[in-house]
Image (cartoon, rainbow, N blue to C red):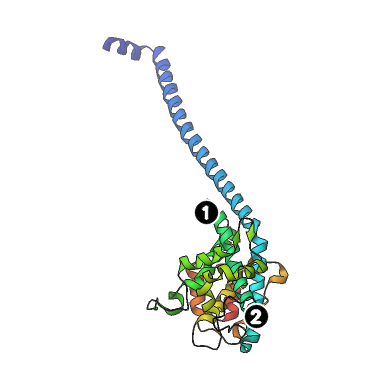
Amino acid sequence: MKLLMLDILDNEKIFPVVISTITTIVVFFLTLLTKNFIDTRILRSKLNTEHKFDQRKKIKEVLAKHKVHLLSACEDFNYRMWNFANNHNNNWLKVNGNYLDRNTYYFQSFIYRLLAVLAWSKKIQKDMIYLDTTIASKEDLDFIKILNIFPCMFCDLTFLEGLQANTNNTDHFYKNEFDHYAYYLITDDGIKSFSTYLDELSTSGSKLNHLFLFFDGMSPLESRKRWDRCHLFQITVIAFLNNYGYDFQKTDPEKFKEILNLPKRSSYLPNYFKLLDDYCLMHNKKIKELKKIAKV
């Protein structure tokens, strides 16, 4: 064997052939390995791209499905808060515990308009439960974040009162309880109309007792934080409409200044914008504009 190897090495004709053959074999296997590696990377990249595209497409479809309804509900609530700011002295929200009277129109329609925003928001979130919203486009992700902010205005204690907040305070709601209110209006094909809501007051309205109690007699002049929560919810609604609404649904800077100061300026505005920052929403152009106007 050793002699054979020496003969090959000494043979000027055979040696180059052997070297060439070995080189070809080595190059072949290296090429094969490299090709497999590159093909695998390309395939993974393609699958990731297709997955991201598919998820983003489905997210947009879900948002578009209920977006117009949510915009209308937000617009209605915004108008009601604007109206309340100018008419709070009339005490139209003071019903003295008479919660199941369908004739207390201002009170019941106020509750309904809030529930409508929550219901349409919940329908969108429910339809997205199996979608990977973490890879949504920036615009859609901000949409989703604002939906998550809505209940915080009524449920989050610390952003108003700090870490020492009293959890027994009646001017807030527990998250699960508040979710229940969102489902109160939801039907298979949308949400209940205001007339249906009124018709069902006598039979199922008691399910909303805590919500009724929260709004009963609410005033911006009281020492409680009920109005502040509704006011900050309105600002969130305005941020949503300014981002995604029709031009006629948007609030211009001058009107927003009025909203901030009528009938008074909330002392919790810095806390509010800090909460938005915690949700990574302060990069949003429209929200930055609102903060600039608020001079926080």
Based on the displayed image, in which of its 4 quarters is residue 2 positioned? top left
User: Which element carries disc 2, helix, strand or loop?
Assistant: helix
Q: Which residue of the protein is positioned furthest toward the left in this rendering?
A: 2
Q: Which mark is residue 129?
A: 1
Q: Position of residue 173 (x, y in %)?
A: 47, 72
Disc 1 marks a residue whose amino acid type is Ile
Q: Nearer the viewer, residue 184 or 70?
A: 184
Residue 282 visible: no
Disc 2 marks a residue whose amino acid type is Trp
Q: Crowdedness of circle 2 by 10 Å Cα count: few (<14), some, many (20+)?
A: some
Counting residues from the start of the chain, the first of labels 2 and 1 encountered is: 2
Q: Nearer the viewer, residue 70 or 271?
A: 70
> Is 57 rendered above or below residue 109?
above
Based on the displayed image, in which of its 4 quarters is residue 75 positioned? bottom right
Q: Which mark is residue 82?
A: 2
The N terminus: image quadrant: top left
